[in-house]
Amino acid sequence: MKLNFKEYAHKAMKTASFKTNDYPLLLIMEEVIEVYEKIEMRAVKVEDIYKELGDLSWGFAAFAMVMRFDLNALTDEVLKALPASHERPKTDLGLLVECGNLVSLISKLSRKTGASADDVIDVVAYPTDEKTSDLNRQIFDQLVNCLKQWIYLCRALDVYPADIMTMNIEKLKGRKERGTLEGSGDSR
């Protein structure tokens, strides 16, 4: 059975352990850079790129969780935004640009308010007025853009997004069994 993003997020978040709400946002940037580093290396195995795309999907799921986004609505918006064909992205850097734009939204709010990114996320995740509801929607829309570009890149690499998510769940299961969920490095 092919995973959809909602199913993936529920399974992946069983492995979530982080102390601050800005961790997934920082992870998204770290992982998108690793994806592009692996692509640039050209000599690297394509499976290594797939692993990084899986780690990035975990970051997206974790961010959606801390933002309290409706995963059905998120999935629906991503699917509506995608063309039916296997259209290639307008730029090979689309995923990097959109993830940068996501971080930039939070960063600008942090600078404007003087609050930490963690505090900004906490406030916007629980909108109490029209302003925070609008900000929540802007961030939701930007995450949709990130996921759309993630799918475009998967397509460009001739891999189904559901396969990337399944591989990531299997990797996480193995790490959980070995007690190596926390830490860093691909060879845990």
Image (cartoon, helix red, strand yellow):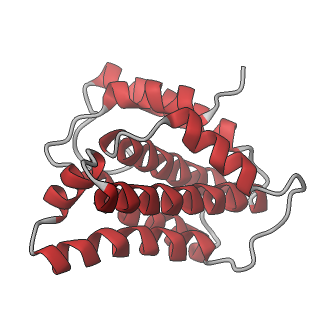
The quadrant where residue 181 appears: top left
Report whether 143 appears left or right of 30. right
Left/right placement of residue 66 relative to residue 3 reads left
Q: Residue at x 41, y 25 (%)?
A: 174
Image quadrant of residue 154? bottom right
x, y (%) of residue 54? 52, 46
Residue 64 against residue 10 in the figure, above or below: below
Location of the C terminus by quadrant is top left
Residue nearest the viewer, comparing 11 with 118: 118
- Please say whether residue 31 is visible from this viewpoint: no
Q: Position of residue 44 (x, y in %)?
A: 60, 64
**Image location of residue 160, percent across then percent down:** 74, 44
The one nearer the camera, 104 or 32, is 104
Q: Is residue 159 left or right of residue 115?
A: right
The picture places residue 103, in percent across and down from the top left corner, at 36, 69
Residue at the outermost front position? 130
- Is any atom of residue 157 visible in this view? yes
In front of the other: 96 or 126: 126
Residue that appears at 60% across and 31% down: 166
Tell me which residue sits at (65%, 50%) in the image: 78
In the image, residue 79 above or below residue 145: above
Q: Is residue 94 above or below residue 170?
A: below
Vertical position of residue 37 compared to residue 7: above or below: below
